[in-house]
Amino acid sequence: MEPEVYTYERYAALATQESTTGLSNLTWSICTMSESELPKARTLPGVLQIGQAGTWVEYKAVTVLRRFDSASRPWLCKLHSIKGPEQPEYILKPEDVGREACVMNIASRLNSIWQEYQVQCCGQAVYVKIYRIFPVGPDMGVVEAVPNAKTLQKLKRDCPTGSRRRERVLQFLQWDESKLNLLAVTTAGLLAMSYMFGLADGHGDNYMVTADGEYFRIDFEHTFGQHPSSADAPRLWLPKAVRVALGDRLEDVICAAQEAVEKLFVIHEELRSLCQVMDMAFPQKQGAVEYLAQLSLEEFRREVQGVRSCSWGKRLKSTFRALGYGRRRDVRHRPMLNVQSPAALLCICRRYPAESAMDLKEFAERLYSTSSLPRLVHFEDASTLIAKLFLNSNPGRGQDGILAARAQIRRKPSRQGRRLPDH
């Protein structure tokens, strides 16, 4: 019987159609870098799937740009492709990102519902910004970094002395009408999502805006009624800088958000089924089904009116954040191994209505045993790629060189001293 850590990686590969070995090698290589070495490039061939269309690319190296000063101390990395344009940046998080990936996948379902019912704001379809989250192992995940995006807190810190910070989003979007319209469109979607998912822990470092005007949320640690231990903002709130940028569009945003929530109640039973999967997979964070059952359209209509101003709770949270911002955290998050985490993601991706925790694993095992995992590990691809590089530096070795290189790769231990499985 294979170790559970391998089972986790296989389930994650099924759910995301990812290159588990390639990403595992990526995480191992980055974790061994000293912070004093950053930024640093390292040759590390592999295969990665990017984009919603699932485009496969081969990369030849990775550059670790920096390490963030947040609770899990994630790394910001950039992959360099063997051919074609440069790849987007990725964030390597030393934690199980399976639950975040589940939340993001459910959010993509919200977008399809709004598109189907033609929910619009400023003449455009309402949506929430989606970015890819790749579970790799029980203590490591890869998150796609949205290009040309800044947190609201970063925009605030970058404001020149004497400037009006409340206009920082307007300045970032250059007072462009099309960008401000997109800000309104994504704000309406985010308000609806915030209510349905119970997004908590709202602060300037958890909200971002792209140069095109897309406003979106990062970090889904506290959802479905769970709150941080300190003071918290209400689940529906808008920073003053966003309200100033929206201007008269704010009324359209509120109306569109109400319509968006109304349409989501049409698929309430489907959402309940997806939330049930999350509750079974993450028992330490149960409560999604119970939270969803308490929601009502009338409640949302009352709460959304409050986004026109800033609550005392948000002001208090901002004060606490300001007092503790930038403080180093030396304790890294090390969750327990939870094989049900990627299994839940797989069920949500396939819209499978699991009814028990065991059902999650059985569904994943049935797929694993009956379907050839599409490009599951890419071990042959990666070893062939390294062998080619080996031959380039050692001409004349021929087929013997390729076999020797592959054998050397298979003998190389992975991180934590475990041997890579043969697939």
Image: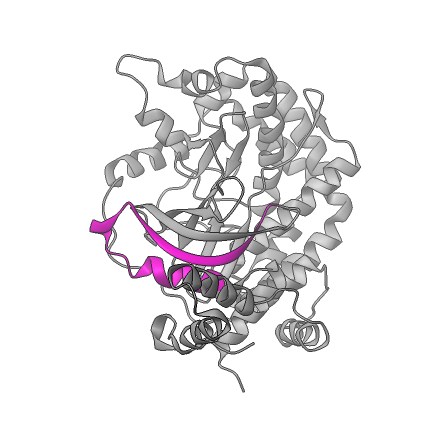
168 versus 325 height, above or below: above
355 versus 113 height, above or below: below
Tell me where residue 146 appears, x and y as whole percent.
Answer: 49, 38
Residue 10 figure quarter: bottom right
Q: Nearer the viewer, residue 309 or 377?
A: 377
Tell me where residue 67 appears, x and y as whole percent.
Answer: 31, 47
Tell me where residue 286 appears, x and y as whole percent.
Answer: 54, 62
Q: Nearer the viewer, residue 12 or 216?
A: 12
Left or right: where 347 falls relative to 34? right
Q: Quadrant of the N terminus?
A: bottom right
145 versus 381 height, above or below: above
Q: Quadrant of the C terminus?
A: bottom right
**Residue 35 shown in magenta:** yes
Left or right: where 414 falls relative to 162? right
Residue pictured at 70% horizontal, 25% vertical = 124
Tell me where residue 248 appears, x and y as whole percent.
Answer: 58, 13
| Residue lying furthest front | 396
Highlighted range, magenta: 22-51
Residue pictured at 38% horizontal, 59% vertical = 94
Residue 206 figure quarter: top left
Coloring applied to the structure: one colour
| Residue lying furthest left | 36
Q: In the rendered picture of this protein, how many numbered marks are placed on residues?
A: 0
Residue pictured at 40% horizontal, 49% vertical = 228
**Residue 149 shown in magenta:** no
Residue pictured at 30% horizontal, 34% vertical = 319
Q: Can you see residue 354?
A: yes
Q: Can you see residue 294?
A: no
